[in-house]
Image: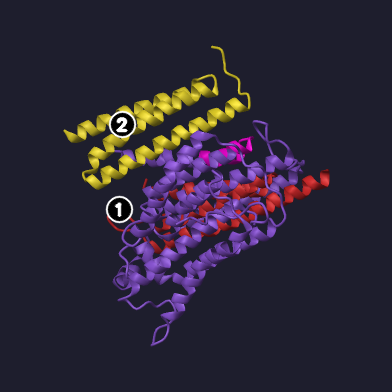
Amino acid sequence: MTDPLVIFDLLLAASVVALAVAVLGVRDLFAAIVLFVIFGLLSALSWVRLSAPDVALAEAAIGTGVTGALLLKTLHHLRFVSGTLDQQAALSVTPLLPVPGAVIWANAAFCGLITLGLAAAFLGAPQAGPGFDPLVADAMPQSGVEHPVTGVLLNFRAYDTLMEVVVLLAAVIAVWQIERGMSDAPAPVMGEVWQGFARLALPAIVVVGTYLLWVGAEAPGGAFQGGAVLAAVGLLLLLTRAYVPRPAHRGIARGAFVLGTGAFAAVALLVAGGGRVAFEYPPEHAKSLILLIEGLVTISIAITLAALFHGREPVALSTQGGRNDT
Amino acid sequence: MLELVAASLIGLGAVFFIAGTVGLLRFPDIFCRLHALTKADGLGLALVALGVALLSGSMGDAFRIGLIWFFVAVASATCSHLIARYARASGEAVSDD
Amino acid sequence: MTPDLIYGFTGVAVFAIGLVGALCAQDRLRRVLALKLCSVGAGFMLVVGAWREPPAAPDPVPHALVITGIVVMVSATAVALALIRRLQSLEAEDDR
């Protein structure tokens, strides 16, 4: 009588929680990052079980893939700076200080209270309660796309998505400022098998990223997932040294960073007027406008994420990521 | 009939994954463990993908599953190579037994 | 036992683990990891809230919110990691 899927759910949930504990408990930082990547992929799998494939794709591509690359790059840099690059395990990068017991107990009590409150709120919340689904279902015909999540992201709540692209822009500006004048860790030597793999994977990743962007109008996918996959092209180009950022490319990079935000805001403002407010696309052009915005935002996201991976602004020797992203 | 074939293929794939996991846990050094893992990845995933492709019912889906198998196989081979290369470069010991 | 109950408690547990880690971990990189765990836990709660018994389609608005959250989190992580790299470089220079 027990549904086998319930057993699967329980096992999956248990491994997600166990991995979360392991991420914080394991002593080697490299192992912690690898466990974190596995944790991210398994939570993406649980979100597929909760019928949220878009979220799962975004988590797998951005929350796990790109974030994992950022974390590994940072670990490499920290080991280089602290001179532990050749050691198998760098246990921690900051010296550990003894903590008074009272502080630990206060923290534990605080965390316990918050967790109890959260669990109580979760149990008290109405199940499958009134949501936005009827509203969204009613408005879908006017949105210009067939997939509800894309409709919400790029039409009904487009101002949210615009702010999200602005946050990415702000992040890349902040990273360039913070890393100004810092020296780079030497790139690891990866060998010729890796070079061959990159050559094989590059065109395929471009096709997959573009497909994800295109299919977003009627099925799970979209600008953020496609952009993250295309950012992998930038990462491969940077890691294989096929593309070495030069200072002369800074102008192009800056242009690419603001392209998404600029185009999004421009379209939003241009459709205003004639009795419409900003972001209110005329229904007959909605699909083409959404595809235009999504395409430009995807290019922008891909280049911004690659630049975030590269870190430092290109000065004299090197910097910034995947200009050839599309 | 088709479902039975698919189910046995997926089951056989799962056996390979279990064998690979046992190898990962039991084998003495990193190179043996990689050897066990690549078997699970290569053959296990191929069998599971074949079973799922039989069940998917449409050529388009089967083609996509095939592509996924191909890229996972290539990526896992590359990863194993990188791990082994790093282990050898940093002087990881090979156990004798 | 429905999926929303199972994964709802997973979300609460992951959030709690992340919170403990963010407060108690001394290593900077691990603290960033703990905050990432918190964000995934919050994502779990929203996705669970959007879930409906299978024939019905889930609520798309929380899904869009979680996607936004994931992108915001990667931006925040990138800035935090850049700050860590800078701090570590400055400390290494001081030691020399």
Tell me if I can see residue B97 in this picture. Answer: yes
Between label 1 and label 2, give the one nearer the viewer. Answer: 2
Element type where label 1 sits in the image? loop
Residue neighbourhood size for the residue with mark 1, other residues' Cα within 10 Å, grouped as few (<14), some (14–19), many (≥20) = few
Tell me if I can see residue C6 in this picture. Answer: no
Query: Up-down: is A232 above or below A218?
Result: above
Q: Which chain is purple?
A: A
A310 or A43, nearer to the observer: A310
Q: Seen in the image, is A222 located left or right of residue A189?
A: left
**Coordinates of residue A310 in the picture (x, y in percent):** 60, 51
Query: Up-down: is A318 above or below B22?
Result: below
**Coordinates of residue A249 in the picture (x, y in percent):** 58, 60
Q: Which chain is yellow?
A: B
Say how the picture is coloured.
by chain
Mark 1 belongs to which subunit? C
In the displayed orientation, state which residue is furthest to the left. Answer: B1
Residue wearing tag 1:
C54
Residue neighbourhood size for the residue with mark 2, other residues' Cα within 10 Å, grouped as few (<14), some (14–19), many (≥20) = many
Q: Which residues are magenta?
A: A18-31
Magenta residue check for B90:
no
